[in-house]
Image (cartoon, grey):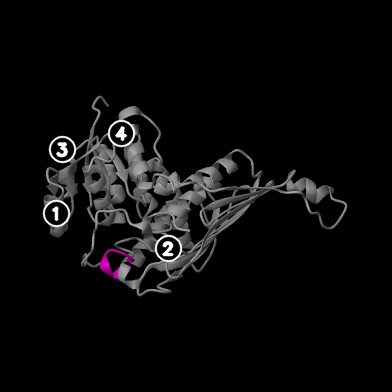
Amino acid sequence: MESSEISVGVIGIGHIGTAHAALIYKGEVPGLRLAAVCDVDPARLSYAESELPGAAVFDDWRKLINSGEVDAVIVATPHPLHAEISACSLQAGLHVLTEKPQDIRLSSAQRANQAADGSGCVYAIMFNQRTNPLFIRLRELVRSGTLGRIKSSSWIVTNWYRTQHYYDEGGWRATWSGEGGGVLMNQAVHNLDIWQWICGMPSRITAFCGIGRYHDIEVEDSAVIYSEYPDGSTGCFITSTGECPGTNRLEICGSMGKAVIEGGVLRLWLLPCDEELLRKNAKTAWVDPKLSYSEYSPEDGGPAHRGVLEAFAGAILNGTPLVADGKEGVCELEIANAAYMSSWLGGVPVSLPIDREKYDSLLSSMQSGSAELGSRGRNITGEYSKRWSVKW
């Protein structure tokens, strides 16, 4: 791309879309210029006309992508529209950065991926927690073999606490038709992505999801996932929006030691040799190997959303790497869809890749009784909320 500036349209200016639009409008993302916004809510369009003067305003995303006003779009609509808008935008020759999740079902996400293939356009997804130095360091430890062969992983991430008011203020939230799920489809999307980004994709999932366990909602606000991997390793993932203060603790145990991230610190214990050698060669029932111990505590949590936006601009203008390719969104989505399927079927193990037609049929059944309401009064600030960042 010859231009040094990309004209961007933000589709959906609710909480997160407004934050993206405001940051770009203020010129704080080099290479990006806010050219247009779109929303179906007249109140949000009035906000844009008042607070984002100069940006074209649209009430239909199709009009925006065909307007000729933009080179790229940021998709920040309710989840079920993510893949459709992304696919149509890519087919129109526009670069796309979509909010997470990529969609609510794999069959839709795959259509977006197919549109990206051969489009010549950049397709990115807002996995902002991949910029956190702690997760980057842990991934390096696993990829480099420092931890040896992975035996197990466990992530307790129950500090995604939300009140009933949170669910009540957005009518599309916490419904099967509007959001496509609960904590696994909204808050813990980031953690599911980081989990597979570090540990790889499981081959089988068994899950139990608590529907409205803590809140008056029709989807899950708690979930427990047990994962099995092709190499025999296992994992456990526990999440909730109904526990306060909650916990955020990720542990990975390997044949050479273990790593734990908690409280904003990565703690690493390493054995002097592979555990298998200790187990098979020891002449006593118990050994007390000399462990090496280290800690890593970064100065900050990384560039987060801004980092993803800057990488998006860099990929378009200079061909530099993205934080996350949009097509990678199918990975965490496959885990979430498998977890729902397992839970809906009574906690039976579900093999990956899942039967997408069967999942779509099961989801449609859940959606048939879904109550999707219009937007209610929302206090949208145009700033990035602390609730969207990594919390310890």
The residue positioned 24% from the left and 57% from the top of the image is 381
Q: Which residue is mark 4?
A: 121
Asked whether disc 3 touches disc 4, contact meaning CB atoms under 8 Å apart, the reply is no
How many angstroms separate mark 1 from mark 2 (CA)?
30 Å
Q: Main secondary structure of the magenta part?
A: loop
Q: In terms of sequence position, does the residue under pointer 2 or pointer 3 come before the other?
A: 3
Q: Are marks 1 and 4 in contact (CB under 8 Å)?
A: no
| 248 over 257 or under it: above or below | below
The three-letter amino acid code for the residue at tag 3 is: Glu
Residue 286 marker: none
What is the three-letter code of the residue carrying label 1?
Answer: Leu
Of circles 3 and 1, which is in front?
A: 1
- N-term-proximal mark, 3 vs 4: 3
Residue with the most extreme front position: 299
Secondary element at image label 3:
loop
The mark that comes first in sequence, 2 or 4, is 4
Q: Looking at the image, which residue sits at the far top?
A: 2
User: Which residue was labeled with disc 3?
Assistant: 69
- Dot 2 falls on a residue whose secondary structure is loop
Q: Secondary structure at mark 1?
A: helix
Foreground: disc 1 or disc 4? 1
| SS type, badge 4 | loop
Dot 2: within a 10 Å radius of its alpha carbon, few (fewer than 14), some, or many (20 or more) residues?
many
Q: Earlier in the sequence, mark 1 or mark 2?
A: 1
Disc 3 vs disc 4: which is toward the camera?
A: 3
Q: Which residue is mark 1?
A: 45
Question: In terms of depth relative to the viewer, which is nearer, 224 or 159?
Answer: 159
Q: Is residue 45 magenta?
A: no
Q: Residues within 10 Å of mark 4 (few under 14, many from 20)?
A: many
